[in-house]
Image (cartoon, rainbow, N blue to C red):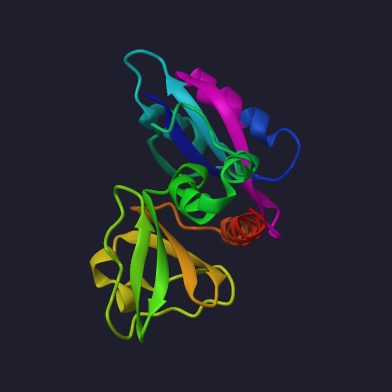
Amino acid sequence: MPFLLRVELPDVPGSLGRVASAIGEAGGDIEAIEIVEHRSDGTAVDDVLLEMAPGMMPDSVVSACNILDGVRVLWVSRYAAGGQLFLDLEVVEQLTQNPALARDQLVDMLPVAFRADWAVRLCRSGDGCKQVHGTSAAPDLGTDSGGWLALERAARLPTEELWPQLNDTEVAGAPLDANEIVVIGRRGGPAILDSELFRVGHLAALAVTIAAAG
């Protein structure tokens, strides 16, 4: 079973090499690496997909990384999405194959592209909203009144106010148009980064454009 490691490290030459060496020495075999975010404070956040050697657990990798100067493991979890990282370009390629279904396909693919647990598409319905499409693990976020989110851009959403049942979940949404939004959720983390908000918003806008051209 692959594991996904999200790690913060100094954004300088050689840092990723040190992390890769530590992972190898701790029994991990790196399958893929994705740069998630470059930060203004001189750090970066990377996602590392890895396989563990027989009998080894990811705890050893976490410990090996955390003792490196300036390196911090933010999150680690099993990762069963086909054993590979799914890039935004691959999402767009899928959307263009059937433009008429682009909005729903976006929802289906967001959890894989963002290592999230679920995604839904919500539509304005009176003063509230209804859920028009969601992945199999998605909770029902529809509400009859007081629940519509008029998002102008992608943003983290306050679950304690909107959906208290999701208080252990990192949630973000992005507008498709004035009457529809997409929402993704990660149970237990990691936190949704600013760079990920930008990507979600960009993919949502592309899905709308593709659907309109289809």
On screen, 72 above or below 103? above
Give the x, y percent position of residue 60: 40, 27
Drawn side of residue 147 relative to residue 91, left or right: left
Picture quadrant where residue 193 is located: bottom right
Q: How many marks?
A: 0
As drawn, the residue found furthest toward the right would be 13
Q: Nearer the viewer, residue 130 or 71?
A: 130
Q: Tell me the quadrant of the picture where the N terminus can be found.
A: top left
Is residue 11 placed above or below 181 in the rendered structure?
A: above
Q: Is residue 184 left or right of residue 163?
A: right
Residue farthest to the left?
A: 165
For the residue pair 168 and 199, the one nearer the viewer reads as 199
Q: Residue 144 in the image: state x and y as whole percent.
A: 27, 80
Residue in view at x 29 percent, y 60 percent: 168
The percent coordinates of residue 105 (x first, y second) are 49, 48
Relative horizontal placement of residue 35, taking residue 131 as reference (left or right): right
Seen at 51% across and 34% down, the residue is: 65
Closer to us: 112 or 56: 112
State which region is magenta. 19-46
User: Residue sitting at 57 percent across and 56 percent down?
Assistant: 196
Seen at 67% across and 36% down, the residue is 15
Residue 189 within the magenta-colored segment of the rendering: no
Q: Which of 105 and 42 is in front in this view?
A: 105
Quarter of the image where one finds residue 142 = bottom left
Can residue 24 be found in the magenta stretch?
A: yes
